[in-house]
Image (cartoon, grey):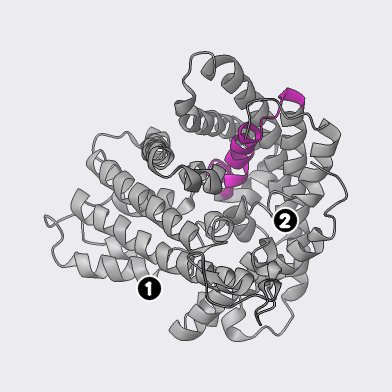
Amino acid sequence: MTDVMSDVSPWAILIAAIFTSNILLTNFLGMCSFLACSRQVGTAVGLGTAVIFVMVCTTAINWCIYTYALVPQELDHLWFIIAIAVIAAFVQFVEMFVERFSPKLYHALGIFLPLITVNCAILGASLLMITRHYGFWQSMAFGLGGGLGWMLAIVLIAGLRQKMTYSDVPQPFKGVAIVMIITGIMAMIFMGFAGMVKI
Amino acid sequence: MSDSQGCSHGGLCGGKGKETMKAGVWITNPVAIQVLGICSALAVTTTLMNSLVMSLALTFVCIGSNLFVSLLRDVTPRRIRMIAEVAIIATFVIIFDLLLKAFYFEMSEQLGPYVGLIITNCIIMGRAEAFALQNPPAVSMLDGLANGIGYTIVLCAVGFFRELLGAGQLFGITIFETTSKGGWYPQNVVMILAPGAFITLGFLIALYNYMSGANDPDKEATS
C-alpha cells in the first residue's frame, strides 16, 4: 500500500462496486440487516433506498472530515470513532425525515432503520474508501455504487425468498441456512462479472 | 433476554454464571442461532489463523465493552445510551487495532477494514443492549466471554473447512498435497472466494440446527 491517490476513473469504481466487487456478495458487508429484511421485496426496496442515500451522504461527509480535519491534525487513530459518530448522527436525521414524510415506510422498516447505524455496509464503505486511497469523486462513486449493489443483492434475494415460501426445504436448512446457500450461489453468479471492469 | 431475569437482585449472580456461559456458547450461540456478526464470520475466515485472531479481537472487545457498559449502566441517560455504547465499543476496537498494528502488522494488513468493522458487529452491540445494561459487571464480563467463545467456535469451524478444502492447508501447514504442487488434492478455489464462505456457513448452521433440533416450525419467527 502506498500513500498516492488511486487513479481509477470514478465510472469504473461505480460499475465495479455494483457488479464485480459487490459490497454484500464479495465484501460481506451489511449481512445482518440483509438477512433480517429480505423477506418481502417491498421492505427490501425501502431499506435499499435508505442505504443508498445514507451511504452516499456519509461517504461524502466522512471523506471531507478525514482529509481536511483528521489528516492535517494527525488524529487519524480517532478515525473509527469519528466515522461511526457521523453515521449515527446522520441515521438519526434520516429516521426523523422518514417518520415525518413516509409513515408507511417507517412502519414497514420498524426497528431496522436505527439498525442502519450498525449496518456494516455503511461503515465499511467509509473505511474501505480510505484504505483504498480514493479521492473525493472516487469515494462518491464508491458510495453510490456500493449502495446500489447492496440494494440489487437484497432485492434479488428477497424475490427468491418470496418464491421459496412454497418450496419444500429440508427441516434443518429452513430459515437462515438456505438463505446463506442461495446467497452463495448468487455470489457465484456475480463472479461471472469479474473482468468486466478493472480496478 | 430470558437469561437476564431476576439477575439484577443478588450480588454477583452466583448461580447465574454457569447458565450465562452455556447460553452464550451454545443455546443462543450468537452466530448460529441469532445470526449476528455474520459479516466478519464470512470475510476473514479464509484461513484458520485469521479466524482465530478475529475471534480474539471480538472476545476482547466484547468483554471490555460489556464491563464498561455495565459499570456505567446507572449513570447513562436512556436517551443517549446507544451513542455511549458505540463510543465505548469504538474505544476498545481502537485499542485492539493499535495493538495489532504494533505487534502483528502482517495480520493487521490481512484483516484490513474488518478490525474497524467490529464496531458495527451486532453481537457486541446486542450483548451491551440485552445483557450488560441490566446486569452487574462481573456477570456481564462472563457473558462477553461466553459470546466470544460461541463466536470463536463458529469462526474456527468455518475457517477450518475453508482453508482445508480451499488450499489444502491448516494454519499454513499443508495437509492435503495439492495437484499444483504434484499432490493428489485438486484445489477447490471457490472455497477461498466469497461463495464458499456463504455456502460453508449455510451448511454449518443447518448442521447446528440438526444437532440441537432448534428448527421447530414454531421457532421460525425468530430466525
In what quadrant of the picture does the N terminus of chain B appear? Answer: bottom left
Residue bearing the label numbered 2: A154
- Foreground residue among B9 and B150: B150
- Foreground residue among A186 and B100: B100
How busy is the neighbourhood of tag 1: few (under 14 within 10 Å), some, or many (20 plus)?
some
Q: Amino acid at mark 1?
A: Ile
Subunit under mark 1? B
Left or right position of B77 against A190 = left
The magenta segment: A112-137
Residue A36's disc is none
Residue A13, located in which quarter of the rendered image?
A: top right
In what quadrant of the picture does the C terminus of chain B appear? Answer: bottom right
Q: Amino acid at mark 2?
A: Ile
How busy is the neighbourhood of tag 2: few (under 14 within 10 Å), some, or many (20 plus)?
many
* Residue at horizontal 66 percent and vertical 36 percent from the top: A98
* Residue at horizontal 58 percent and vertical 39 percent from the top: A123
- Foreground residue among B50 and B170: B170
Secondary structure beneath disc 1?
helix
The image shows residue A102, relative to residue B192, as above or below, that is: above
Tell me where residue A86 appears, x and y as whole percent.
54, 28
Residue B27's disc is 1
* Residue at horizontal 54 percent and vertical 61 percent from the top: B45
The image shows residue A62, relative to residue B7, as above or below, that is: above
Direction right: furthest residue:
A196
Tell me where residue B31 appears, x and y as whole percent.
48, 64
Secondary structure beneath disc 2?
helix
Left or right position of B114 against A41 = left
Q: Does residue A120 show up magenta in the picture?
A: yes
Tell me where residue A155 appears, x and y as whole percent.
76, 56
> In this rendering, do the residues under marks 1 and 2 share a single chain?
no
